């Protein structure tokens, strides 16, 4: 006779709380409290009018990449990993997500912090207005005026660690944890072509200081096809660099990027096999050809029309093949028809992500000056 352990019997959902809480946003997602059979309360996020299937796929890929990182002794010693969370799609237009407890969107912390620590600077809201006015300017004008905006808005994210971690040892350890998590997320985001990395799509854990990326509607470089194309491989703006301490991108960040990319490149075959299965899956085709809500948001803000310019394109197979080919090139170190070493590739990516020439051409909702 088969026996069932007590722990197994306690797994499951007892009920959801009677009250729900709205958390803002265009599609009004709801915060739920789930009472589990083990006596614990777990918070979940219910989203409607939003396709969660690509987010679920990305979390699966992240989980597999974490296994590759754990299997490498050096990466395991450095504790290199990307934070994940559970996503359960319920339909094409709804899903339920694990609530990332003790986290805050970087933008939610940064906007009041800039006014708190740098009252003499312009506010992020004023900076956004000034930056939005550059939308139809030439690249040279954008670059010049973007530089002037940055001169009037100094980074403050290093204060996050001084606020949260008062003991010197804790402050140092958490800053290292933050730097490594940014590095791993940046390299994985680059390989998978994840875009739309504005300040509301990156959370920071207030206890561990790890960053957690959310909302993966833009992947496999679809950000380059947006009405305002994305010109950077990942987010590496001044405030994010400020949180890394006095050495900035040098030292821990660069070494963590190099080790992560080295492992990804060494596992070229299994990564391509995984992505090939996912991209050719009939359930995945819904998003390979569309730019999802980032494009809708851009079109709505620019033209007041959420549907303009959105629609199908070439066949799913051709789109999937192009996506796979680009991922393969990245894993081979191929950039602009030239092959580079891991160190050279990381150096190039960091420059591309942080140069004002690329940052000034981004959509104003991205807030590249933060």
Image (cartoon, rainbow, N blue to C red):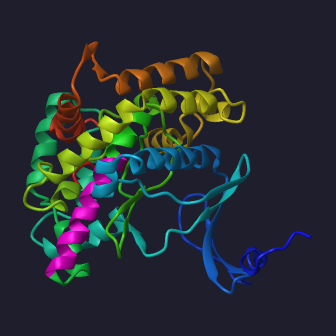
Q: Position of residue 202 (x, y in %)?
A: 39, 57
| Residue pictured at 31% horizontal, 43% vertical | 260
Q: For residue 302, what is the image quadrant? A: top left
Nearer to us in this view, 256 or 151: 256
The answer to whether residue 237 is visible is yes
Q: For residue 120, what is the image quadrant? A: bottom left
Bounds of the magenta segment? 168-185
Q: Quadrant of the N terminus?
A: bottom right
Residue 355 drawn above or below residue 37: above
Q: Position of residue 52 (x, y in %)?
A: 63, 50
Q: For residue 144, what is the image quadrant? A: top left
Residue 75 drawn above or below residue 156: above
Q: Is 330 within the magenta?
A: no
Nearer to us in this view, 315 or 117: 315
Q: Position of residue 23 (x, y in %)?
A: 55, 71
Would you say 317 lies left or right of 111 here? Answer: right
Magenta stretch: helix, strand or loop mostly: helix
Would you say 91 lies left or right of 355 here? Answer: right
The answer to whether residue 228 is visible is no
């Amino acid at each position: 006779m088969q026996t069932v352990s007590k722990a197994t019997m306690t797994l499951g959902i007892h009920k959801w709380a009677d009250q729900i809480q709205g958390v803002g946003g265009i599609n009004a997602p709801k915060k739920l409290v789930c009472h589990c059979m083990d006596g614990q309360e777990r918070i979940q996020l219910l989203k409607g009018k939003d396709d969660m299937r690509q987010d679920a796929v990305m979390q699966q890929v992240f989980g597999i990449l974490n296994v590759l990182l754990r299997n490498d002794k050096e990466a395991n010693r450095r504790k290199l990993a990307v934070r994940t969370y559970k996503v359960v799609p319920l339909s094409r237009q709804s899903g339920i997500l694990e609530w990332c407890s003790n986290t805050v969107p970087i933008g939610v912390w940064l906007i009041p912090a800039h006014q708190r620590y740098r009252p003499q600077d312009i506010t992020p809201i004023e900076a956004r207005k000034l930056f939005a006015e550059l939308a139809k300017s030439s690249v040279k004008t954008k670059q010049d005026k973007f530089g002037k905006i940055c001169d009037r808005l100094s980074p403050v994210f290093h204060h996050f660690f001084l606020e949260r971690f008062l003991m010197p040892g804790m402050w140092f350890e958490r800053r290292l944890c933050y730097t490594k998590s940014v590095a791993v997320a940046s390299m994985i985001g680059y390989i998978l072509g994840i875009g739309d990395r504005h300040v509301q799509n990156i959370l920071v854990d207030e206890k561990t200081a790890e960053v957690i990326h959310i909302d993966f509607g833009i992947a496999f470089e679809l950000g380059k096809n947006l009405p305002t194309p994305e010109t950077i491989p990942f987010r590496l703006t001044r405030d994010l660099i400020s949180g890394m301490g006095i050495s900035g991108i040098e030292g821990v960040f660069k070494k963590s990027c190099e080790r992560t990319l080295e492992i990804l490149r060494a596992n070229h075959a299994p990564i391509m096999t995984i992505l090939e299965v996912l991209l050719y899956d009939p359930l995945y085709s819904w998003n390979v050809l569309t730019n999802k809500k980032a494009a809708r948001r851009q079109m709505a803000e620019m033209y007041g029309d959420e549907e303009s310019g959105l629609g199908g394109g070439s066949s799913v197979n051709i789109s999937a093949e192009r996506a796979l080919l680009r991922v393969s090139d990245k894993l081979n170190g191929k950039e602009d028809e030239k092959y580079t070493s891991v160190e050279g590739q990381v150096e190039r990516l960091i420059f591309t992500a942080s140069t004002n020439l690329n940052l000034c051409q981004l959509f104003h909702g991205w807030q590249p000056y933060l």
